[in-house]
Amino acid sequence: MLKGKKILVLIALFAVLSLSLSTSVLAQETTFVSLATGGTSGTYYPVGGAIAKVLNENIEDMNASAQSTGASVTNTRLIYNQEVELAILQNDIASYAVNGENQFSDNQVNNMTGIAALYPEVIQIVVRDDAGIKSVADLKGKKVAVGAPGSGAEANAKQIIEFFGLTYDDIDEDYLSFGEAASRLKDRQIDAAFLTAGIPTAAVMDVAATQDISLLNFSDEDIESLNSKYPYLTGVTVPAGSYNGLEEDTQTVALKAILVAVDDLTQETVYNITKAIFENRQTLIEAHDRARDITLDGALDGMTVELHPGAQQYYDEVK
């Protein structure tokens, strides 16, 4: 009889131990997060890689990885299809997506939430100095890289070309990524390229190292008119010296890069992500100088989608 009681006690102890181990395993379950960025020659990729590093080093049981993608439009669709949990994209593309406008008129994205506005994305029209291009009108008849197919850069290129009275029928357009455009410019296979990215952009630095290039300058009137038609486009100055050979300040327009998340990420997870980013800015800055623009004061500037509750919780605590 005593032996039977001992067996029952042992069974009970094993049951308690098993339950304890199961609870411990659940508590330590790893959270896997994929962050969609952009091409390796742009700004999204190094900044996204640095964000993933910060998350892995500062959030317990977090496994974050940055993916190279076709950037804004591609990233929006990855969020929509729940193929990634986080993404960096242009704020105009995000707005079109959640409101079912433009390229998303038949496919509204209803699961995208905001975490933070990151930095200005400058629309740069890079031209070879020997191509004889001094204005957007001079692009007529030229070979022009307009961005990867369906990318945010391509959407911006089309807007600006049409704003100045041209269409793709007036140019020899080529749908190229930043890296591809840089390579073609260096080989003199194209005359100009549209790039939307933070300053400095690796692809432009690459070209400027071997070619004499310029950025097209917009007048005050051009910037005012563009802003009236496209409210997300605001004036910005690219300082002289940003690229090799760029001897004067250049006026152009910019959007905002924003970090977004799928809406079903838990509030705790997004709170921890937001906290880790803003409390480890120096790691981001060491990866790319553009991260200096990632600040609490500007975290909501240009945010065009509803904030995730986890991000809102963090801002409520620190502001």
Image: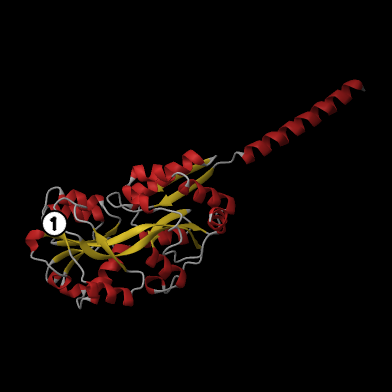
| Total marks placed | 1
**Quadrant housing residue 102:** bottom left
**Quadrant housing residue 298:** bottom left
Location of residue 103 in the rendering, given as x and y in whole percent from the top left corner: 37, 71
Name the residue that disc number 1 marks.
213
Location of residue 308 in the rendering, given as x and y in whole percent from the top left corner: 53, 59
Q: Nearer the viewer, residue 261 or 230?
A: 230
At x 73% / y 31%, what residue is drawn? 17
From what the image shows, is residue 184 above or below residue 286?
below
Kind of element beneath mark 1: strand
At x 22% / y 65%, what residue is drawn? 251
Query: Most extreme residue toward the right, as rendered?
Result: 1
At x 14% / y 55%, what residue is drawn? 247
Q: Nearer the viewer, residue 119 or 193?
A: 119
Regarding residue 68, the answer to whether it shows in the image is: no
Q: Nearer the viewer, residue 23 or 291?
A: 291
Q: Amino acid at mark 1?
A: Ile
Regarding residue 104, the answer to whether it shows in the image is: yes
Location of residue 67 in the rendering, given as x and y in whole percent from the top left corner: 38, 49
Q: Nearer the viewer, residue 280 or 131?
A: 280
Location of residue 239 in the rendering, given as x and y in whole percent from the top left corner: 23, 56
Side of 99 where 168 appears, left or right: left
The figure's colour scheme reads secondary structure
Side of 291 where 54 appears, left or right: right
Decide: few, some or many residues near mark 1? Use Cα within 10 Å; few <14, some 14-19, many ≥20.
many
Side of 53 where 16 appears, left or right: right
Which image quadrant: the N terminus? Answer: top right
From what the image shows, is residue 50 above or below residue 219?
above
Side of 140 where 239 appears, left or right: right
